[in-house]
Image: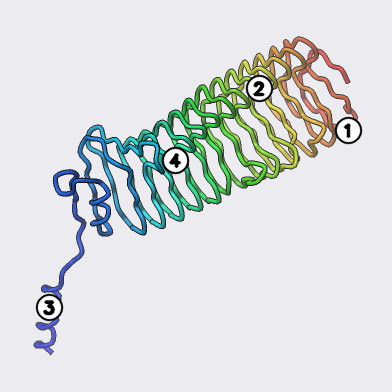
């Protein structure tokens, strides 16, 4: 028995143990791509300041690529600056991707984290999560792309604490269970955040604590066909159209605790069914503060504050809703205008002027 134990101990001592290596670019490898091709799971690639060609990370698990200094990955207008395909647990940090069709394309992958990166001058999408799960874009900047950040056929992705400017639509969520949280969005040509599209609706997404200014269309737009979307504690200012708009043929949304100010049309427009709008503050909308469209049904509107709208504070065009403890005041036309008043329930509201 003693001989067998001793032999086993010697065998284990002689066996090689896997360990993480640091691969240095350009000291050990001239290019990032060469380091990626040589990497094993658990390795870290440390990239010194400089300009590098586009990078493909394919079929790799547990790898970190970290910039040290000003690291630029420049696609020069050909392909994507950085591709991550069929990977798990990839971490990208302190990198600048530019001049790609897509700045970063994450496809068929899971648990990819893009942290403290800059993505600039993409001809299609800044950061695209395609057919991936649990991918994260954190504390990063996206500039100058038709679409800033987009999820397609993906699940459970996170866009957190990012700054997005000079895009058509800053964030587009397609798929399910995504979160857009704590982002700063300014000067976009279309929507600040779009949830779902005609072809690709979204389900179960959370839009939380974002600041959206100067959107060329709606601040937050929920497309028809998208369901169970939570829009919480956002600030929307100076949109050229509506502040928050939930379209018809969608259902089950929660719009709570948002501040909407000085938008050029309606503060909050609800066309969706079974929607709860509560604790929102809407001021100085050019037309209506809160508009409940004729397509909406079975909504709950509670503890909202609407002031100084250019037309009606609250306008209602459909029945089956409950309005509880709302305050609407100092609006140019009516504080409440409800064309189907008897079909709705009103309890504890404060309206100065009404047309019912």
Q: Earlier in the sequence, mark 3 or mark 2?
A: 3
Mark 3 and mark 2: Cα distance apart in space: 73 Å
Quarter of the N terminus within the rendering: bottom left
Q: Is residue 158 left or right of residue 302?
A: left
Mark 1 and mark 3: Cα distance apart in space: 82 Å
Q: Are the residues flagged by discs 3 and 2 in contact, CB closer than 8 Å? A: no
Residue that appears at 65% across and 44% down: 228
Give the vertical position of 45 relative to 119 (above or below).
below
Q: Secondary structure at mark 2?
A: loop
Reading the image, the residue beneath label 3 is: 9
Q: Earlier in the sequence, mark 2 or mark 1?
A: 2
Residue that appears at 70% across and 44% down: 225
Reading the image, the residue beneath label 1 is: 343
Residue that appears at 24% across and 51% down: 34
In front: mark 2 or mark 4? 4
* Mark 1 residue crowding within 10 angstroms, few (<14) / some (14–19) / many (20+): few
Mark 2 and mark 1: Cα distance apart in space: 29 Å
Between 167 and 183, which is closer to the camera in this rendering? 167
Numbered tag placed on residue 241 in the rendering:
2
Mark 1 and mark 4: Cα distance apart in space: 50 Å
Q: Earlier in the sequence, mark 3 or mark 4?
A: 3
Between 323 and 211, which is closer to the camera in this rendering? 211
Numbered tag placed on residue 102 in the rendering:
4
Q: Earlier in the sequence, mark 1 or mark 4?
A: 4
In front: mark 2 or mark 1? 2
**x, y (%) of residue 131?**
51, 53
Mark 3 and mark 4: Cα distance apart in space: 52 Å
Q: Quadrant of residue 247?
A: top right
Q: Secondary structure at mark 3?
A: helix
């Amino acid at each position: 028995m003693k001989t067998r134990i001793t032999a086993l101990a010697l065998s284990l001592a002689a066996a090689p143990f896997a360990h993480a290596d640091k691969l240095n670019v350009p000291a050990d490898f001239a290019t990032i791509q060469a380091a990626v091709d040589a990497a094993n799971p658990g390795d870290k690639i440390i990239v010194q300041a400089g300009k590098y060609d586009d990078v493909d990370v394919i079929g790799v698990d547990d790898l970190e690529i970290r910039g040290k200094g000003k690291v630029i990955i420049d696609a020069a207008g050909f392909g994507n600056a950085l591709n991550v395909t069929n990977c798990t647990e990839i971490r990208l940090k302190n990198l600048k991707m530019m001049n790609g069709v897509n700045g970063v394309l994450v496809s068929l992958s899971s648990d990819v984290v893009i942290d403290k990166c800059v993505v600039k001058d993409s001809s299609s999408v800044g950061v695209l999560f395609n057919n991936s799960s649990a991918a994260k874009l954190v504390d990063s900047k996206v500039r100058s792309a038709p679409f800033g950040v987009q999820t397609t056929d993906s699940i459970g992705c996170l866009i957190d604490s990012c700054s997005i400017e000079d895009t058509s639509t800053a964030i587009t969520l397609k798929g399910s269970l995504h979160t857009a949280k704590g982002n700063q969005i300014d000067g976009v040509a279309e929507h600040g955040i779009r949830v779902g599209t005609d072809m690709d609706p979204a389900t179960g997404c959370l839009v939380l604590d974002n600041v959206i200014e100067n959107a060329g269309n709606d601040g937050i737009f929920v497309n028809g066909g998208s369901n169970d979307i939570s829009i919480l504690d956002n600030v929307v200012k100076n949109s050229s159209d509506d502040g928050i708009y939930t379209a018809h043929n969608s259902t089950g949304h929660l719009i709570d605790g948002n501040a909407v100010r000085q938008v050029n049309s309606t503060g909050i427009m609800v066309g969706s069914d079974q929607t709860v709008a509560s604790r929102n503050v809407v001021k100085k909308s050019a037309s209506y503060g809160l508009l409940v469209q004729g397509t909406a049904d079975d909504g709950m509107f509670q503890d909202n504050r609407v002031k100084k709208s250019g037309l009606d504070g609250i306008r209602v065009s459909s029945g089956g809703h409950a309005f509880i403890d709302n305050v609407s005041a100092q609006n140019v036309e009516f504080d409440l205008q409800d064309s189907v008043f008897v079909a709705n329930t009103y309890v504890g509201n404060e309206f100065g002027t009404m047309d019912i």
